[in-house]
Image (spheres, rainbow, N blue to C red):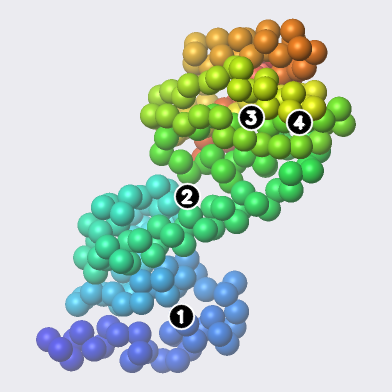
């Protein structure tokens, strides 16, 4: 049995097949997702190499890294060979990747369409398992001056504080406001509550010479724009 365990150890592989050595020799871009995860976990179990175990973990989420990022520590630990430390390592690495993606969009980005909003917020909201409501503040040239998480809640709802939204807009001297939130369920449809919240913020902003330009509902696979659908006339 010990010899079988040894045969699955990465140190016994051909040097060209070892993920760490492959990364050093050929660069990180050539590694598969499974090989990158294998580097994180370091070893497999009695019957699988680290790469094979990583392949099985990825296969469980249809090789979708966003779905992998949604797995809890407990869910990751259901795979034989993944203890708490390895599960935490995977979760931490994926969270760093998510944050890196979110930072790729500079705050000074100019918003000219719903696609621009989606590009800014998708890395932040796409793979969450709960709803978050964010506000993007724009200046007179439609450039982003600030983005802020307003609230977070359960899977079905968040609480939006209109006064806080407008107070921050006044502090920033913003003239345009964009609302965004995610639907973890993947439903690209505005709920009655979404519409009511949008109308409430529109009316409040108008009274202070500000405009709500759009409200985007974001999922892993796409978005729904209130402005594109004619529900907002910014």
At x 41%, y 53%, the residue is 68
Mark 4 or mark 3, which has the lower sequence index? 3
The reply, left or right, for residue 50 in relation to residue 195 is left
Looking at the picture, how far across and down is residue 35, in whole percent? 44, 73
- What kind of element bears circle 4? helix
At x 49%, y 13%, the residue is 193
In which quarter of the view is residue 1 placed? Answer: bottom left
Which numbered mark, 3 or 2, is in the foreground of this view?
A: 3
Mark 4 or mark 2, which has the lower sequence index? 2
Q: Image height check: is 78 above or below 184? A: below
CA distance separating discs 3 and 2: 23 Å
- What kind of element bears circle 3? strand
Identify the disc placed on residue 220: none
Q: Residues within 10 Å of mark 1 (few under 14, many from 20)?
A: many
Q: Residues within 10 Å of mark 3 (few under 14, many from 20)?
A: many
The residue carrying mark 2 is 66
CA distance separating discs 4 and 1: 48 Å
Residue 113 in sight in this render: no
- What kind of element bears circle 2? helix
The residue carrying mark 3 is 135
Mark 3 or mark 2, which has the lower sequence index? 2
CA distance separating discs 1 and 2: 22 Å
Contact? badges 3 and 2 (CB < 8 Å) = no
The residue carrying mark 1 is 19
Which numbered mark, 4 or 1, is in the foreground of this view?
A: 4
Could you say which is closer to the camera, residue 14 or residue 10? 10
Looking at the picture, how far across and down is residue 191, in whole percent? 49, 16
């Amino acid at each position: 049995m010990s010899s079988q365990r040894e045969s699955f150890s990465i140190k016994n592989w051909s040097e060209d097949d070892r993920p760490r050595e492959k990364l050093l020799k050929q660069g990180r871009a050539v590694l598969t997702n499974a090989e990158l995860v294998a580097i994180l976990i370091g070893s497999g179990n009695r019957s699988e190499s680290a790469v094979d175990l990583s392949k099985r973990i990825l296969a469980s989420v249809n090789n979708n890294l966003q779905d992998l990022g949604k797995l809890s520590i407990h869910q990751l630990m259901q795979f034989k060979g993944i203890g708490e430390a390895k599960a935490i390592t995977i979760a931490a690495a994926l969270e760093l990747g998510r944050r890196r993606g979110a930072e790729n969009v500079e705050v000074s980005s100019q918003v000219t369409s719903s696609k621009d909003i989606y590009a800014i917020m998708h890395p932040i909201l796409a793979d969450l398992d709960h709803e978050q409501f964010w506000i993007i503040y724009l200046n007179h040239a439609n450039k982003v001056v600030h983005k802020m998480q307003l609230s977070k809640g359960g899977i079905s709802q968040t609480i939006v504080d209109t006064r806080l939204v407008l107070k921050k807009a006044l502090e920033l001297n913003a003239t345009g406001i964009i609302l965004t939130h995610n639907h973890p369920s993947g439903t690209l449809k505005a709920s009655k509550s979404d519409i009511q919240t949008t109308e409430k913020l529109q009316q409040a902003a108008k009274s202070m010479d500000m405009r709500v330009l759009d409200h985007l509902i974001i999922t892993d696979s796409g978005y729904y724009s209130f402005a594109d659908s004619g529900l907002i006339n910014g």
